[in-house]
Amino acid sequence: MMETLTSSFTTEGYWELFSLVRNSVITAGVLGLMGGLIGVFIMLRRTALVVHGIAEISFAGAALALLIGVDVVAGSAMGAVAASLLIGVLSLKDRDTSAVTGVLMPFGLGLGILFLSLYQGRSANKFGLLTGQIVGVDDIQTQTLVTGAVVISIALLLIWRPLMFASVDPQLARARGVRVNLLSMVFMVLLGVAVAMSVQVVGALLVLALLVVPAAAALKVTVRPYLAVLLSMLFALISSVGGIMLAITGTVPISPYITTISFLIYVVCVLIGRGGRTRRREAAAALTA
Amino acid sequence: MAEAPMAELSNPESPKTGPSRTEPFATGPLVRLRDASVGFSGRTLWEGLDLDLAPGEFLAVLGPNGAGKSTFLKVLLGLNRLTSGTAEIAGAPVRRGSSRVGYIPQQQTMPEETPLRARDMVALGLDGHRFGIRLHPRRLRRRVDELLEAVGATAYADMPVGLLSGGEQQRLRAAQALASNPAVLLCDEPLHSLDLNHQQAVTELIRRQAVERGSAVVFVTHEINPVIEHVDRVLYFARGQYRIGTTAEVMRSEVLSELYGSSVDVIEHKGRLLVMSTLDESCHYHPEELALP
Protein backbone atom coordinates (compact mmCIF):
# COMPACT_ATOMS: atom_id res chain seq x y z
CA MET A 1 0.00 0.00 0.00
CA MET A 2 2.60 2.54 1.06
CA GLU A 3 4.87 1.50 -1.77
CA THR A 4 2.11 2.06 -4.25
CA LEU A 5 1.58 5.53 -2.90
CA THR A 6 5.22 6.54 -2.66
CA SER A 7 5.86 5.31 -6.16
CA SER A 8 3.42 8.05 -7.18
CA PHE A 9 6.05 10.64 -6.54
CA THR A 10 8.80 9.64 -8.94
CA THR A 11 9.56 12.54 -11.26
CA GLU A 12 12.21 10.78 -13.32
CA GLY A 13 11.50 11.04 -17.05
CA TYR A 14 8.25 12.87 -16.34
CA TRP A 15 7.99 14.72 -19.62
CA GLU A 16 8.66 11.59 -21.65
CA LEU A 17 5.76 9.96 -19.84
CA PHE A 18 3.72 13.10 -20.38
CA SER A 19 4.20 13.04 -24.14
CA LEU A 20 2.87 9.49 -24.14
CA VAL A 21 -0.42 10.65 -22.59
CA ARG A 22 -0.72 13.88 -24.58
CA ASN A 23 -3.92 12.65 -26.19
CA SER A 24 -5.40 11.88 -22.80
CA VAL A 25 -4.55 15.31 -21.47
CA ILE A 26 -6.17 17.05 -24.42
CA THR A 27 -9.24 14.87 -24.18
CA ALA A 28 -9.55 15.31 -20.44
CA GLY A 29 -9.12 19.06 -20.73
CA VAL A 30 -11.81 19.45 -23.36
CA LEU A 31 -14.19 17.11 -21.57
CA GLY A 32 -13.51 19.04 -18.37
CA LEU A 33 -14.43 22.32 -20.02
CA MET A 34 -17.66 20.80 -21.35
CA GLY A 35 -18.41 19.21 -17.96
CA GLY A 36 -17.99 22.54 -16.20
CA LEU A 37 -20.37 24.19 -18.65
CA ILE A 38 -23.15 21.61 -18.52
CA GLY A 39 -22.58 21.21 -14.77
CA VAL A 40 -24.04 24.63 -14.05
CA PHE A 41 -27.33 23.53 -15.61
CA ILE A 42 -27.17 20.19 -13.81
CA MET A 43 -26.98 22.07 -10.53
CA LEU A 44 -29.68 24.56 -11.54
CA ARG A 45 -32.06 21.80 -12.51
CA ARG A 46 -31.16 19.76 -9.44
CA THR A 47 -30.32 16.73 -11.52
CA ALA A 48 -27.02 15.71 -9.89
CA LEU A 49 -28.40 12.29 -9.07
CA VAL A 50 -29.56 11.87 -12.66
CA VAL A 51 -25.93 12.18 -13.78
CA HIS A 52 -25.02 9.28 -11.55
CA GLY A 53 -27.98 7.25 -12.82
CA ILE A 54 -27.15 7.87 -16.45
CA ALA A 55 -23.52 6.97 -15.80
CA GLU A 56 -24.42 3.64 -14.27
CA ILE A 57 -26.90 2.79 -16.98
CA SER A 58 -24.31 3.77 -19.60
CA PHE A 59 -22.14 1.15 -17.93
CA ALA A 60 -24.86 -1.37 -18.72
CA GLY A 61 -24.79 -0.23 -22.36
CA ALA A 62 -21.03 -0.61 -22.47
CA ALA A 63 -21.22 -4.05 -20.89
CA LEU A 64 -23.78 -5.11 -23.48
CA ALA A 65 -21.53 -3.81 -26.25
CA LEU A 66 -18.63 -5.79 -24.82
CA LEU A 67 -20.77 -8.90 -24.68
CA ILE A 68 -22.07 -8.72 -28.24
CA GLY A 69 -18.71 -7.57 -29.56
CA VAL A 70 -19.38 -4.02 -30.77
CA ASP A 71 -17.60 -0.79 -29.84
CA VAL A 72 -17.71 -0.23 -26.11
CA VAL A 73 -17.69 3.57 -26.36
CA ALA A 74 -20.67 3.48 -28.71
CA GLY A 75 -22.41 1.06 -26.38
CA SER A 76 -21.94 3.30 -23.38
CA ALA A 77 -23.13 6.31 -25.38
CA MET A 78 -26.27 4.48 -26.48
CA GLY A 79 -26.93 3.36 -22.93
CA ALA A 80 -26.49 6.90 -21.61
CA VAL A 81 -28.75 8.52 -24.19
CA ALA A 82 -31.41 5.84 -23.72
CA ALA A 83 -31.26 6.33 -19.97
CA SER A 84 -31.43 10.11 -20.15
CA LEU A 85 -34.36 10.03 -22.57
CA LEU A 86 -36.21 7.57 -20.37
CA ILE A 87 -35.61 9.64 -17.25
CA GLY A 88 -36.58 12.79 -19.14
CA VAL A 89 -39.88 11.36 -20.41
CA LEU A 90 -40.84 9.79 -17.09
CA SER A 91 -40.18 12.98 -15.13
CA LEU A 92 -41.77 15.47 -17.55
CA LYS A 93 -44.92 15.70 -15.54
CA ASP A 94 -43.77 16.31 -11.99
CA ARG A 95 -40.08 17.12 -12.57
CA ASP A 96 -39.18 14.63 -9.87
CA THR A 97 -36.10 13.29 -11.63
CA SER A 98 -34.48 11.81 -8.55
CA ALA A 99 -37.36 9.39 -7.90
CA VAL A 100 -37.35 8.21 -11.52
CA THR A 101 -33.58 7.85 -11.41
CA GLY A 102 -33.80 5.89 -8.19
CA VAL A 103 -36.16 3.49 -9.91
CA LEU A 104 -34.16 3.08 -13.13
CA MET A 105 -30.63 2.98 -11.70
CA PRO A 106 -30.69 -0.37 -9.92
CA PHE A 107 -32.32 -1.94 -12.96
CA GLY A 108 -29.59 -0.57 -15.24
CA LEU A 109 -26.81 -1.64 -12.89
CA GLY A 110 -28.31 -5.09 -12.59
CA LEU A 111 -28.36 -5.43 -16.37
CA GLY A 112 -24.74 -4.29 -16.48
CA ILE A 113 -23.68 -6.92 -13.97
CA LEU A 114 -25.61 -9.56 -15.89
CA PHE A 115 -23.90 -8.68 -19.19
CA LEU A 116 -20.46 -8.63 -17.57
CA SER A 117 -20.98 -12.02 -15.96
CA LEU A 118 -21.97 -13.46 -19.33
CA TYR A 119 -18.86 -11.99 -20.96
CA GLN A 120 -15.97 -14.43 -21.28
CA GLY A 121 -13.14 -12.01 -22.10
CA ARG A 122 -10.41 -10.34 -20.07
CA SER A 123 -11.45 -8.98 -16.71
CA ALA A 124 -9.35 -5.80 -17.16
CA ASN A 125 -11.93 -4.63 -19.68
CA LYS A 126 -14.59 -4.83 -17.03
CA PHE A 127 -12.71 -2.61 -14.67
CA GLY A 128 -11.95 0.08 -17.20
CA LEU A 129 -15.66 0.72 -17.62
CA LEU A 130 -16.09 1.56 -13.98
CA THR A 131 -12.98 3.57 -13.21
CA GLY A 132 -12.04 5.22 -16.49
CA GLN A 133 -9.57 4.27 -19.19
CA ILE A 134 -8.38 7.53 -20.62
CA VAL A 135 -4.68 6.69 -20.67
CA GLY A 136 -5.40 4.34 -23.53
CA VAL A 137 -7.14 6.78 -25.91
CA ASP A 138 -5.79 6.83 -29.44
CA ASP A 139 -5.88 9.66 -32.00
CA ILE A 140 -9.24 8.73 -33.45
CA GLN A 141 -10.91 8.46 -30.06
CA THR A 142 -9.39 11.79 -29.08
CA GLN A 143 -10.81 13.38 -32.19
CA THR A 144 -14.25 11.88 -31.58
CA LEU A 145 -14.37 12.94 -27.95
CA VAL A 146 -13.11 16.46 -28.62
CA THR A 147 -15.57 16.92 -31.49
CA GLY A 148 -18.41 15.66 -29.32
CA ALA A 149 -17.48 18.00 -26.48
CA VAL A 150 -17.29 20.99 -28.79
CA VAL A 151 -20.66 20.17 -30.39
CA ILE A 152 -22.32 19.81 -27.00
CA SER A 153 -20.81 23.04 -25.73
CA ILE A 154 -21.99 24.97 -28.78
CA ALA A 155 -25.47 23.48 -28.50
CA LEU A 156 -25.59 24.52 -24.84
CA LEU A 157 -24.53 28.07 -25.68
CA LEU A 158 -27.26 28.31 -28.31
CA ILE A 159 -30.05 27.21 -25.98
CA TRP A 160 -28.48 29.00 -23.02
CA ARG A 161 -31.08 31.68 -22.35
CA PRO A 162 -34.28 29.65 -22.77
CA LEU A 163 -32.73 26.75 -20.85
CA MET A 164 -31.72 29.06 -18.02
CA PHE A 165 -35.19 30.65 -18.08
CA ALA A 166 -36.93 27.27 -18.07
CA SER A 167 -34.65 25.99 -15.30
CA VAL A 168 -35.07 28.82 -12.81
CA ASP A 169 -38.61 29.96 -13.62
CA PRO A 170 -40.52 27.33 -15.62
CA GLN A 171 -43.92 28.92 -15.01
CA LEU A 172 -43.05 32.28 -16.51
CA ALA A 173 -40.87 30.74 -19.21
CA ARG A 174 -43.83 28.66 -20.40
CA ALA A 175 -46.07 31.72 -20.43
CA ARG A 176 -43.48 33.59 -22.47
CA GLY A 177 -43.61 30.87 -25.11
CA VAL A 178 -40.56 28.81 -24.15
CA ARG A 179 -41.04 25.13 -24.98
CA VAL A 180 -40.14 23.99 -21.51
CA ASN A 181 -40.74 20.27 -22.05
CA LEU A 182 -38.96 20.16 -25.38
CA LEU A 183 -35.96 21.99 -23.90
CA SER A 184 -36.01 19.58 -21.02
CA MET A 185 -35.69 16.63 -23.42
CA VAL A 186 -32.97 18.35 -25.48
CA PHE A 187 -31.05 18.97 -22.28
CA MET A 188 -31.42 15.34 -21.25
CA VAL A 189 -30.01 14.14 -24.57
CA LEU A 190 -27.05 16.54 -24.30
CA LEU A 191 -26.55 15.38 -20.74
CA GLY A 192 -26.67 11.73 -21.82
CA VAL A 193 -23.97 12.24 -24.45
CA ALA A 194 -21.88 14.35 -22.05
CA VAL A 195 -22.06 11.64 -19.41
CA ALA A 196 -21.18 8.93 -21.90
CA MET A 197 -18.08 10.89 -22.91
CA SER A 198 -17.05 11.71 -19.36
CA VAL A 199 -17.35 8.05 -18.46
CA GLN A 200 -14.36 7.59 -20.77
CA VAL A 201 -12.27 9.86 -18.56
CA VAL A 202 -13.20 9.03 -15.01
CA GLY A 203 -15.46 6.01 -15.37
CA ALA A 204 -19.08 5.45 -14.52
CA LEU A 205 -18.62 5.63 -10.78
CA LEU A 206 -16.80 8.94 -10.64
CA VAL A 207 -18.46 10.92 -13.41
CA LEU A 208 -20.00 13.26 -10.85
CA ALA A 209 -16.51 14.61 -10.13
CA LEU A 210 -16.32 16.17 -13.59
CA LEU A 211 -19.95 17.10 -14.20
CA VAL A 212 -21.24 18.15 -10.80
CA VAL A 213 -18.50 19.03 -8.33
CA PRO A 214 -16.88 21.90 -10.31
CA ALA A 215 -20.26 23.59 -10.87
CA ALA A 216 -21.28 23.04 -7.26
CA ALA A 217 -18.02 24.65 -6.16
CA ALA A 218 -18.46 27.61 -8.52
CA LEU A 219 -22.00 28.25 -7.29
CA LYS A 220 -20.63 28.51 -3.75
CA VAL A 221 -18.52 31.53 -4.62
CA THR A 222 -20.53 33.53 -7.16
CA VAL A 223 -24.09 34.37 -8.15
CA ARG A 224 -23.17 35.92 -11.49
CA PRO A 225 -24.32 33.49 -14.16
CA TYR A 226 -21.41 33.97 -16.59
CA LEU A 227 -18.79 33.97 -13.86
CA ALA A 228 -20.31 30.80 -12.43
CA VAL A 229 -19.87 29.07 -15.79
CA LEU A 230 -16.30 30.31 -16.28
CA LEU A 231 -15.25 29.24 -12.79
CA SER A 232 -16.95 25.89 -13.15
CA MET A 233 -15.13 25.24 -16.43
CA LEU A 234 -11.83 26.33 -14.89
CA PHE A 235 -12.28 24.04 -11.87
CA ALA A 236 -13.16 21.08 -14.08
CA LEU A 237 -10.15 21.76 -16.28
CA ILE A 238 -7.80 21.91 -13.28
CA SER A 239 -9.25 18.68 -11.87
CA SER A 240 -9.10 16.64 -15.06
CA VAL A 241 -5.77 17.77 -16.49
CA GLY A 242 -4.16 18.09 -13.06
CA GLY A 243 -5.38 14.63 -12.15
CA ILE A 244 -3.81 13.02 -15.20
CA MET A 245 -0.53 14.90 -14.82
CA LEU A 246 -0.20 13.69 -11.24
CA ALA A 247 -1.39 10.17 -12.00
CA ILE A 248 1.14 9.36 -14.72
CA THR A 249 3.96 9.50 -12.19
CA GLY A 250 2.77 6.40 -10.39
CA THR A 251 0.65 3.33 -10.47
CA VAL A 252 -2.45 4.69 -8.75
CA PRO A 253 -5.27 5.11 -11.31
CA ILE A 254 -6.31 8.54 -12.54
CA SER A 255 -9.76 8.68 -10.95
CA PRO A 256 -8.72 9.27 -7.33
CA TYR A 257 -6.54 12.18 -8.36
CA ILE A 258 -9.34 13.84 -10.31
CA THR A 259 -11.91 13.30 -7.58
CA THR A 260 -9.55 14.50 -4.85
CA ILE A 261 -8.58 17.67 -6.69
CA SER A 262 -12.19 18.54 -7.48
CA PHE A 263 -13.22 17.82 -3.91
CA LEU A 264 -10.46 20.04 -2.52
CA ILE A 265 -11.54 22.84 -4.85
CA TYR A 266 -15.08 22.38 -3.56
CA VAL A 267 -13.96 22.59 0.08
CA VAL A 268 -11.98 25.76 -0.58
CA CYS A 269 -15.00 27.28 -2.36
CA VAL A 270 -17.31 26.39 0.50
CA LEU A 271 -14.97 28.16 2.91
CA ILE A 272 -14.65 31.23 0.68
CA GLY A 273 -18.37 31.21 -0.04
CA ARG A 274 -19.36 31.24 3.62
CA GLY A 275 -17.79 34.63 4.17
CA GLY A 276 -19.29 36.08 0.99
CA ARG A 277 -22.71 34.67 1.74
CA THR A 278 -22.80 36.18 5.20
CA ARG A 279 -21.81 39.55 3.78
CA ARG A 280 -24.48 39.38 1.09
CA ARG A 281 -27.13 38.30 3.55
CA GLU A 282 -26.27 41.21 5.79
CA ALA A 283 -26.49 43.54 2.81
CA ALA A 284 -29.90 42.06 1.93
CA ALA A 285 -31.11 42.49 5.49
CA ALA A 286 -29.87 46.08 5.50
CA LEU A 287 -31.96 46.77 2.39
CA THR A 288 -35.20 45.51 3.86
CA ALA A 289 -34.61 47.21 7.19
CA MET B 1 -40.42 43.04 -28.52
CA ALA B 2 -41.23 46.65 -27.86
CA GLU B 3 -38.12 48.63 -27.11
CA ALA B 4 -40.09 51.51 -25.58
CA PRO B 5 -38.31 52.94 -22.57
CA MET B 6 -40.05 52.26 -19.32
CA ALA B 7 -38.60 55.11 -17.32
CA GLU B 8 -41.69 57.24 -17.71
CA LEU B 9 -43.58 54.70 -15.72
CA SER B 10 -42.05 56.41 -12.74
CA ASN B 11 -42.18 59.79 -14.47
CA PRO B 12 -45.40 60.11 -16.44
CA GLU B 13 -44.57 63.65 -17.56
CA SER B 14 -41.52 62.42 -19.46
CA PRO B 15 -41.21 64.38 -22.71
CA LYS B 16 -40.14 61.16 -24.46
CA THR B 17 -43.68 59.83 -24.33
CA GLY B 18 -44.64 59.17 -27.92
CA PRO B 19 -48.12 58.77 -29.41
CA SER B 20 -47.88 54.98 -29.36
CA ARG B 21 -47.68 55.10 -25.61
CA THR B 22 -50.33 57.70 -24.81
CA GLU B 23 -52.95 55.76 -26.78
CA PRO B 24 -51.48 52.32 -27.17
CA PHE B 25 -54.44 50.00 -27.43
CA ALA B 26 -57.35 52.26 -28.37
CA THR B 27 -59.34 50.00 -30.66
CA GLY B 28 -61.86 47.54 -29.29
CA PRO B 29 -61.77 45.38 -26.19
CA LEU B 30 -58.36 44.08 -25.12
CA VAL B 31 -59.74 40.78 -23.90
CA ARG B 32 -62.71 39.21 -25.64
CA LEU B 33 -64.22 35.86 -24.70
CA ARG B 34 -67.26 34.48 -26.48
CA ASP B 35 -69.17 31.48 -25.19
CA ALA B 36 -65.92 30.17 -23.76
CA SER B 37 -65.86 26.81 -21.98
CA VAL B 38 -63.09 24.83 -20.38
CA GLY B 39 -62.94 21.35 -18.95
CA PHE B 40 -60.64 18.46 -18.23
CA SER B 41 -61.29 14.79 -18.91
CA GLY B 42 -65.03 15.16 -19.25
CA ARG B 43 -65.52 17.53 -16.33
CA THR B 44 -66.49 21.08 -17.22
CA LEU B 45 -64.81 23.76 -15.15
CA TRP B 46 -66.89 26.62 -16.46
CA GLU B 47 -68.85 27.26 -19.63
CA GLY B 48 -70.58 29.91 -21.69
CA LEU B 49 -68.35 32.74 -20.52
CA ASP B 50 -68.76 36.04 -22.39
CA LEU B 51 -66.41 38.83 -21.43
CA ASP B 52 -65.08 42.07 -22.88
CA LEU B 53 -62.34 43.95 -21.11
CA ALA B 54 -61.83 47.59 -22.08
CA PRO B 55 -58.45 49.36 -21.99
CA GLY B 56 -57.57 50.35 -18.44
CA GLU B 57 -60.14 48.04 -16.91
CA PHE B 58 -59.24 46.15 -13.72
CA LEU B 59 -60.92 42.74 -13.37
CA ALA B 60 -60.64 40.78 -10.12
CA VAL B 61 -61.09 37.01 -10.53
CA LEU B 62 -62.29 35.31 -7.36
CA GLY B 63 -63.48 31.91 -6.27
CA PRO B 64 -62.49 28.84 -4.26
CA ASN B 65 -59.51 26.67 -5.19
CA GLY B 66 -60.14 24.47 -8.20
CA ALA B 67 -63.02 26.57 -9.52
CA GLY B 68 -61.07 27.54 -12.61
CA LYS B 69 -59.37 30.85 -11.80
CA SER B 70 -55.90 29.71 -12.82
CA THR B 71 -57.30 27.94 -15.86
CA PHE B 72 -58.91 31.21 -16.87
CA LEU B 73 -55.44 32.80 -16.85
CA LYS B 74 -53.94 29.87 -18.72
CA VAL B 75 -56.54 30.28 -21.44
CA LEU B 76 -55.55 33.92 -21.85
CA LEU B 77 -51.87 32.91 -21.87
CA GLY B 78 -52.57 30.40 -24.63
CA LEU B 79 -51.48 27.50 -22.42
CA ASN B 80 -54.93 25.92 -22.09
CA ARG B 81 -57.31 25.38 -24.95
CA LEU B 82 -60.98 26.22 -24.73
CA THR B 83 -63.24 23.24 -25.22
CA SER B 84 -65.55 25.60 -27.08
CA GLY B 85 -65.88 29.28 -27.85
CA THR B 86 -63.22 31.86 -28.68
CA ALA B 87 -60.68 33.92 -26.78
CA GLU B 88 -58.96 37.00 -28.20
CA ILE B 89 -56.29 39.36 -26.92
CA ALA B 90 -56.23 42.83 -28.52
CA GLY B 91 -58.20 41.58 -31.51
CA ALA B 92 -56.11 38.48 -32.25
CA PRO B 93 -56.69 34.89 -31.08
CA VAL B 94 -54.78 34.05 -27.90
CA ARG B 95 -51.26 32.87 -28.61
CA ARG B 96 -48.68 31.51 -26.27
CA GLY B 97 -45.69 33.76 -25.71
CA SER B 98 -47.43 36.86 -27.08
CA SER B 99 -45.68 40.10 -26.16
CA ARG B 100 -49.10 41.78 -25.84
CA VAL B 101 -49.58 39.82 -22.63
CA GLY B 102 -47.67 40.40 -19.40
CA TYR B 103 -47.79 37.79 -16.68
CA ILE B 104 -46.99 37.98 -12.99
CA PRO B 105 -47.06 34.43 -11.64
CA GLN B 106 -47.72 33.42 -8.10
CA GLN B 107 -44.81 34.22 -5.85
CA GLN B 108 -42.51 31.25 -5.39
CA THR B 109 -39.28 31.53 -3.52
CA MET B 110 -36.11 31.10 -5.54
CA PRO B 111 -33.54 28.70 -4.07
CA GLU B 112 -30.78 30.54 -2.26
CA GLU B 113 -28.00 29.39 -4.58
CA THR B 114 -29.73 30.42 -7.81
CA PRO B 115 -26.89 32.03 -9.77
CA LEU B 116 -28.89 35.08 -10.79
CA ARG B 117 -28.82 38.65 -9.59
CA ALA B 118 -31.97 40.74 -9.63
CA ARG B 119 -30.86 42.27 -12.93
CA ASP B 120 -30.29 38.83 -14.49
CA MET B 121 -33.81 37.79 -13.61
CA VAL B 122 -35.31 40.91 -15.20
CA ALA B 123 -33.12 40.34 -18.27
CA LEU B 124 -34.51 36.80 -18.59
CA GLY B 125 -38.00 38.28 -18.57
CA LEU B 126 -36.96 40.49 -21.49
CA ASP B 127 -35.17 38.02 -23.77
CA GLY B 128 -35.07 34.68 -21.96
CA HIS B 129 -37.27 33.09 -24.61
CA ARG B 130 -34.74 33.73 -27.40
CA PHE B 131 -32.10 31.32 -28.64
CA GLY B 132 -28.49 32.16 -29.34
CA ILE B 133 -26.22 34.59 -27.55
CA ARG B 134 -27.18 38.14 -26.60
CA LEU B 135 -26.39 40.52 -29.45
CA HIS B 136 -26.75 43.89 -27.72
CA PRO B 137 -25.67 43.47 -24.11
CA ARG B 138 -25.29 47.23 -23.53
CA ARG B 139 -28.75 48.07 -24.79
CA LEU B 140 -30.19 45.25 -22.71
CA ARG B 141 -28.37 46.50 -19.63
CA ARG B 142 -29.78 50.01 -20.07
CA ARG B 143 -33.27 48.63 -20.49
CA VAL B 144 -32.93 46.43 -17.42
CA ASP B 145 -31.72 49.43 -15.42
CA GLU B 146 -34.78 51.40 -16.53
CA LEU B 147 -37.12 48.59 -15.56
CA LEU B 148 -35.44 48.13 -12.19
CA GLU B 149 -35.82 51.83 -11.54
CA ALA B 150 -39.46 51.81 -12.62
CA VAL B 151 -40.34 49.16 -10.04
CA GLY B 152 -38.10 50.65 -7.35
CA ALA B 153 -35.62 47.77 -7.33
CA THR B 154 -32.44 49.66 -8.19
CA ALA B 155 -31.10 49.32 -4.65
CA TYR B 156 -30.88 45.53 -4.94
CA ALA B 157 -30.13 45.23 -8.65
CA ASP B 158 -26.92 43.27 -8.00
CA MET B 159 -28.17 41.15 -5.12
CA PRO B 160 -28.70 37.41 -5.63
CA VAL B 161 -32.43 36.76 -6.15
CA GLY B 162 -32.30 33.87 -3.70
CA LEU B 163 -31.58 36.30 -0.86
CA LEU B 164 -34.37 38.75 -1.68
CA SER B 165 -37.63 38.79 0.22
CA GLY B 166 -40.84 37.62 -1.42
CA GLY B 167 -41.93 41.21 -1.91
CA GLU B 168 -38.67 42.20 -3.54
CA GLN B 169 -38.84 39.21 -5.86
CA GLN B 170 -42.41 40.12 -6.75
CA ARG B 171 -41.29 43.61 -7.82
CA LEU B 172 -38.83 41.96 -10.18
CA ARG B 173 -41.66 39.87 -11.58
CA ALA B 174 -43.64 43.05 -12.11
CA ALA B 175 -40.63 44.47 -13.98
CA GLN B 176 -40.53 41.33 -16.15
CA ALA B 177 -44.24 41.56 -16.88
CA LEU B 178 -44.24 45.27 -17.68
CA ALA B 179 -41.17 45.05 -19.92
CA SER B 180 -43.09 44.68 -23.17
CA ASN B 181 -45.69 47.31 -22.24
CA PRO B 182 -48.38 44.62 -22.49
CA ALA B 183 -51.95 45.32 -23.61
CA VAL B 184 -53.17 42.82 -21.05
CA LEU B 185 -51.59 42.23 -17.67
CA LEU B 186 -52.37 38.87 -16.09
CA CYS B 187 -51.65 38.50 -12.39
CA ASP B 188 -51.90 35.21 -10.51
CA GLU B 189 -52.15 35.96 -6.79
CA PRO B 190 -49.33 38.49 -7.06
CA LEU B 191 -49.77 39.66 -3.46
CA HIS B 192 -49.85 36.22 -1.90
CA SER B 193 -47.69 36.03 1.25
CA LEU B 194 -46.41 39.60 0.90
CA ASP B 195 -46.35 42.03 3.78
CA LEU B 196 -48.59 45.09 3.65
CA ASN B 197 -45.89 47.45 2.36
CA HIS B 198 -45.00 45.26 -0.57
CA GLN B 199 -48.66 44.50 -1.26
CA GLN B 200 -49.27 48.20 -1.71
CA ALA B 201 -46.15 48.73 -3.79
CA VAL B 202 -46.91 45.86 -6.18
CA THR B 203 -50.58 46.86 -6.43
CA GLU B 204 -49.52 50.39 -7.28
CA LEU B 205 -47.26 49.16 -10.10
CA ILE B 206 -50.13 47.16 -11.57
CA ARG B 207 -52.63 49.99 -11.17
CA ARG B 208 -50.33 52.47 -12.89
CA GLN B 209 -49.93 50.14 -15.85
CA ALA B 210 -53.74 50.14 -16.16
CA VAL B 211 -54.45 53.80 -15.52
CA GLU B 212 -51.48 55.48 -17.20
CA ARG B 213 -50.84 53.12 -20.06
CA GLY B 214 -54.26 51.66 -20.65
CA SER B 215 -53.56 47.97 -20.10
CA ALA B 216 -56.44 45.73 -19.12
CA VAL B 217 -55.65 43.95 -15.84
CA VAL B 218 -56.85 40.47 -14.90
CA PHE B 219 -56.10 39.97 -11.24
CA VAL B 220 -56.65 36.50 -9.81
CA THR B 221 -56.85 36.60 -6.03
CA HIS B 222 -58.20 34.93 -2.94
CA GLU B 223 -58.59 38.24 -1.24
CA ILE B 224 -60.25 41.21 -2.90
CA ASN B 225 -59.67 43.74 -0.11
CA PRO B 226 -56.07 44.78 -0.88
CA VAL B 227 -57.15 45.87 -4.37
CA ILE B 228 -60.82 46.64 -3.77
CA GLU B 229 -60.59 50.37 -4.55
CA HIS B 230 -59.04 49.65 -7.97
CA VAL B 231 -61.40 46.89 -9.06
CA ASP B 232 -63.81 47.79 -11.86
CA ARG B 233 -65.45 44.39 -12.20
CA VAL B 234 -65.45 41.05 -10.43
CA LEU B 235 -65.54 37.63 -12.08
CA TYR B 236 -66.51 35.05 -9.48
CA PHE B 237 -66.14 31.32 -10.24
CA ALA B 238 -67.70 28.58 -8.12
CA ARG B 239 -69.27 25.17 -8.70
CA GLY B 240 -68.91 25.30 -12.48
CA GLN B 241 -70.72 28.63 -12.69
CA TYR B 242 -69.67 32.23 -12.69
CA ARG B 243 -71.03 35.69 -11.96
CA ILE B 244 -69.65 38.85 -13.45
CA GLY B 245 -70.36 42.49 -12.64
CA THR B 246 -69.18 45.40 -10.55
CA THR B 247 -68.03 44.69 -7.03
CA ALA B 248 -71.36 45.90 -5.67
CA GLU B 249 -73.29 43.65 -8.06
CA VAL B 250 -71.38 40.44 -7.39
CA MET B 251 -70.14 40.69 -3.83
CA ARG B 252 -73.61 40.39 -2.27
CA SER B 253 -75.00 37.77 0.05
CA GLU B 254 -77.79 36.74 -2.36
CA VAL B 255 -75.49 36.42 -5.36
CA LEU B 256 -72.76 34.41 -3.62
CA SER B 257 -75.30 32.25 -1.76
CA GLU B 258 -76.87 31.32 -5.06
CA LEU B 259 -73.45 30.70 -6.62
CA TYR B 260 -72.28 28.47 -3.78
CA GLY B 261 -75.66 26.83 -3.31
CA SER B 262 -75.50 27.49 0.39
CA SER B 263 -75.99 30.41 2.69
CA VAL B 264 -73.16 32.95 2.45
CA ASP B 265 -72.99 36.34 4.10
CA VAL B 266 -71.10 39.29 2.68
CA ILE B 267 -70.47 41.91 5.30
CA GLU B 268 -69.10 45.33 4.53
CA HIS B 269 -66.92 47.01 7.09
CA LYS B 270 -65.18 50.35 6.45
CA GLY B 271 -64.99 49.69 2.70
CA ARG B 272 -63.66 46.15 3.21
CA LEU B 273 -65.63 43.00 2.42
CA LEU B 274 -65.93 39.97 4.63
CA VAL B 275 -67.31 36.80 3.06
CA MET B 276 -68.43 34.11 5.46
CA SER B 277 -70.52 31.02 5.26
CA THR B 278 -73.32 30.69 7.77
CA LEU B 279 -72.05 28.18 10.31
CA ASP B 280 -74.66 25.55 9.74
CA GLU B 281 -74.24 21.79 10.05
CA SER B 282 -75.70 21.26 6.61
CA CYS B 283 -73.32 23.77 5.04
CA HIS B 284 -70.95 22.13 2.56
CA TYR B 285 -68.78 25.14 2.03
CA HIS B 286 -66.73 26.05 5.01
CA PRO B 287 -65.00 29.36 5.35
CA GLU B 288 -61.62 28.16 4.11
CA GLU B 289 -63.23 26.92 0.93
CA LEU B 290 -64.78 30.29 0.45
CA ALA B 291 -61.27 31.64 0.34
CA LEU B 292 -61.46 33.89 3.30
CA PRO B 293 -58.61 36.19 4.33
Image: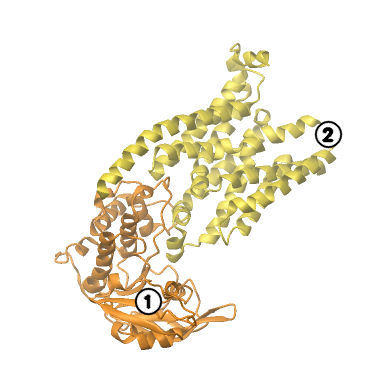
Chain colours: A yellow, B orange
Disc 2 crowd, CA 10 A, few/some/many (<14, 14-19, 20+): few
* Relative side of A269 to B100, left or right: right
* Quarter residue A74 falls in: top right
Badge 2 sits on which subunit? A
Is disc 1 surrounded by few (<14), some (14 to 19) or many (20+) residues within 10 Å?
Answer: many
Residue A252 percent location from the top left of the image: 65, 22
- Which residue is at a point 38% across and 43% down the rendered structure image? A224
**Could you say which quadrant of the image residue A279 lies in?**
top left
Q: Quadrant of residue B100?
A: bottom left
Is residue B162 something that shows in the picture? yes
Q: Residue at x 43, y 59 (%)?
A: B129
Front in this rendered view, residue B124 or A264: A264
Relative height, residue B116 to residue A274 (above, below):
below
Q: Residue at x 33, y 82 (%)?
A: B251
- The residue at which mark 2 appears reads as A121
Q: Name the residue under label 1.
A: B61
Question: How many numbered discs, if any?
Answer: 2
Residue B181 in the figure: left or right of residue A177? left
Q: Residue A103 carries which label?
A: none
Q: Distance from label 1 to label 2 (Cα)?
A: 70 Å
List x then y, in percent, for residue A218. Answer: 45, 37
SS at circle 2: loop
Where the N terminus of chain A falls, by quadrant?
top right
Residue B16, horizontal then vertical, whole percent: 17, 64
Kind of residue sitting beneath label 2: Gly
Q: Residue at x 49, y 39 (%)?
A: A216
Query: What amino acid is found at the position of numbered circle 1 in the picture?
Result: Val
